Amino acid sequence: GEEMRSAGFPRRRLAVVIGFACALAMAAPTSAAENDGHDLMKRAIAALPTAPLAARVRLSGDVREAREFVAKHKVVDGARATYIEVVAPESLVGLRFLFKQRVGEPPLRYMKYIAAPGPVLVTSETRADPFLGSTFYLIDLTEPDLDAFTHEIVGEEMLQGRACTLVASTPKNREGEVYGKIIHAIDPKDSVVVRRQFFDQDGLALKEWTAERIEKIDGNWTVRDQRMKFLPGNLESRLEMTEVAYGVEIPDSDFGKEHLAR
């Protein structure tokens, strides 16, 4: 103590320095958890397939009748683009969707109603509309905007034989958000999301998404079978890829609004 005071560290200043150091030490774990959570989410998004994809998908479960649609996916001008066209049942043929997502920007979602003259932009008010009458919302069909959330590691869990890290994503601006929090279970080894738990703005469990079957196809981890449970109503919908092919030739024009409106 005397040595420090003689070196220009009076006792009061020394206490402030020690207190500041303790505050930094206490804050470090949270900061590290947030940094690691953000990094893991970024890796999971970066690991999504970038090769052109064509698939046929069946939607079943708690819907009036099974739906089938074709889906195309491709990276166009740096944006992940997905085109969906319903092919069954007959009453829904002609219903189309287009999603475009660029890293660091909110995703754009368009849909073409059967009788509408052109595509319409999915607004913040309609993001929670059910996709084809299922427990999947339109917002669930795209990845969350990475920078619009804080991501913190909150635990670990074994799921489907995978040692997963749990990352809680909380919106930086809660106003107008569909979910108050999402907890992602990510396998850091393969950077794949195995489960997502969705909570409302009051913190109550709302929905749970699970990747029931994940396969590696042409070097791409692919969710072949996924389910979404709506917990308050005990309802569940299933999306199953019945056919899938990577590396197919798909023109960029298939992901334009003109193609959506044809």
Image (spheres, grey):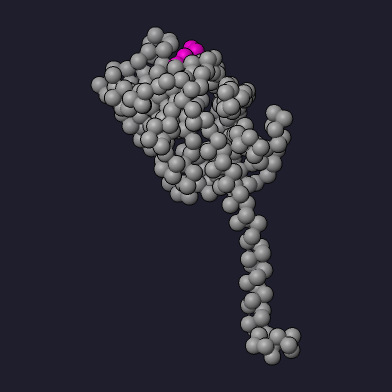
Confirm whether residue 231 shows in the render.
Answer: no
Whether 43 is drawn above or below 84: the answer is: below
Counting from the top left corner in percent of width and height, residue 93 is at: 37, 13
Counting from the top left corner in percent of width and height, residue 140 is at: 49, 31
Whether 230 is drawn above or below 67: the answer is: below
Counting from the top left corner in percent of width and height, residue 58 is at: 51, 15
User: Residue 156 lies in what quarter of the image?
Assistant: top right
Q: Is residue 146 left or right of residue 26?
A: left
Magenta-colored span: 64-69
Counting from the top left corner in percent of width and height, residue 78 is at: 41, 37
Whether 11 is drawn above or below 158: the answer is: below
User: Residue 251 lies in what quarter of the image?
Assistant: top left
Q: Is residue 144 magenta?
A: no
Residues 63 and 40: in front is: 40
Q: Is residue 56 left or right of residue 212?
A: left
Residues 201 and 217: in front is: 217
Whether 164 is drawn above or below 5: the answer is: above
Number of callouts: 0
The quarter in which the C terminus is drawn is top left
Confirm whether residue 28 shows in the render.
Answer: yes
The quarter in which the N terminus is drawn is bottom right
**What's the residue at 63%, 61% (across, down)?**
27
Seen as rendered, the residue at the extreme top is 90
Residues 249 and 232: in front is: 249
Seen as rendered, the residue at the extreme bottom is 6
**What's the residue at 45%, 49% (across, down)?**
173
Residues 150 and 174: in front is: 150
